[in-house]
Amino acid sequence: MEEFLNNNDIKNEDIKNIEESSFEENIEEPSFEENETSETEVFNPITVSKPKPIKNYKPMSIGLKVFSIIMAGIIMLTAACSVGYFVGRSSVKFAEKQNAGIDLKKRPKDAEQMSEAEIYNTTGQSVVGIMIYNASGKGSQASGIVYSEDGYIITNDHIYSEVSSAKFKIYTHDGKEYNAKYVAGDKVSDLAVLKVDNAKLKPAIFGNSDELFYGEHVVAIGRPRNANEDSSITSGIISGLNRRVQTTSSYSSRVIQTDSAINPGSSGGALVNMYGQVIGVTSSKMASVDYEGVGYAIPTTVMKRIVKELIDEGKVISRAKLGITYKAIDSVLAEINNSKYTGLLIDSVTEESGLYGKVNQGDIITHINGIAVTNDSIVLDIIENCKAGDKVNITVVDTAQKTKTFNVVLLANVSESSYTITDVLPEISGEAEESEKNGGKFNFPFGE
């Protein structure tokens, strides 16, 4: 090295200056290459530039700003409409179901009672005539009560039982005529719902039937002659409350008894208190054939629950049943048959019943919820006040005289409607006719 330096006339001081200058200007990390035999360090330069301000910046034009704002607004509006649409659909469905229910008005405390003429001129506007007919020429007539302003009408389920594929014409108090469609019906309660579209009707004011008392004056409004004629009005009193009658050979229910005339054609009409409140739906099907001056009406407390489910669900789904057939043993039958027990003598048990596999034919239900069963109405009343899925406590004495107790989940008693879409009505066998004539087996409760 020294020989090299001497030959090139480079002094040691110059070499030192060169090395220091190179280090200051080239502040790069060393790069090593494979196969490099030189021990001299090599540095790569780093170029650092100072930031320079942008001199040609131009702000967004007013037109572009306006365009951006408009586009943002459109996007937000579209999103809001979409959300509103789906929320609106949900709220409409919810509102429809809410509208299906009604409030039963309390009896006015300070108001004076209305005259029959005043009731006819007010509440009578909410009673309609119904023409039932089909393409085969079969027909019948009935009455109905306007349930809501948007066109729901209450009537009886039995009115179309003999008219298959029935169609309906509605005649209002002002002489107008509307087509109506069948919504749903229920054999057990003998209630049904029709619907008139695109009509603004006057709904009735419904009172609480639980406030009725014996001897209270009432009127019945309906159309017993022709559906397209004016309604008629009859006057009477409440002659019975919570009377259990059989609506068909298999069903029974608690009803209001009145001596107001309720004739064929008045079915589905209104039983009204003297404050203009509808407190019952009349039914000529329940009219007694053994006594004159006895008519029946379905209480509004029953109507409210049944009609709401018919509109909301298309059927009754909350009503309960035990799922057995039976024969009631009262104290007289117990004495005649030398039995120590009153109650329900079990004839059969459906597979779905909570008692299936636990009781047998011939066993006797003696208590329900701790209450002694002295007649079948006790059990029916308890179950009518329950809902499907509720539990009841059943005490049974079997054929070996052993007492057993079971907690039983009640089944859903979803009944059918009398409405049919066939021209062929079901035939009743001779055995069934004889059974109906003699009372037959009472399916417990309400059919099963």
Image (cartoon, rainbow, N blue to C red):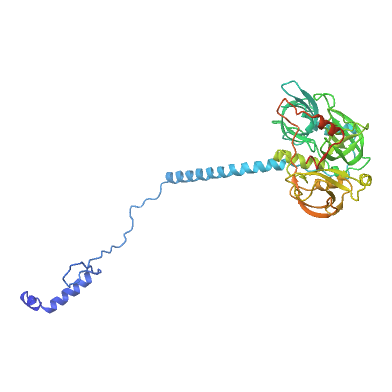
Q: Position of residue 365 (x, y in %)?
A: 84, 49
* Residue closest to the eye, 284 or 273: 284
Q: In the displayed structure, does residue 402 sit left or right of residue 414?
A: right
| Rendered image quadrant of residue 9 | bottom left
Q: In the displayed structure, does residue 443 sit left or right of residue 311?
A: right
Which image quarter holds the N terminus?
bottom left
Q: Position of residue 360 (x, y in %)?
A: 79, 48
Mark count? 0
| Rendered image quadrant of residue 24 | bottom left
Looking at the image, residue 417 lies above or below residue 390: above
Residue 209 visible in the current orientation: yes
Looking at the image, residue 166 lies above or below residue 308: above
Of all residues, the one furthest to the top in this rendering is 137
* Residue at 89% from the left image edge and 37% from the top image edge: 257
Which image quarter holds the C terminus?
top right
* Residue closest to the eye, 154 or 274: 154
* Residue closest to the eye, 395 or 397: 397
Of all residues, the one furthest to the left in this rendering is 7
Residue 277 visible in the current orientation: no
Of all residues, the one furthest to the front in this rendering is 400
* Residue closest to the eye, 102 or 350: 350
* Residue at 83% from the left image edge and 43% from the top image edge: 326
Q: Position of residue 375 (x, y in %)?
A: 88, 46
Q: Position of residue 251 (x, y in %)?
A: 82, 38
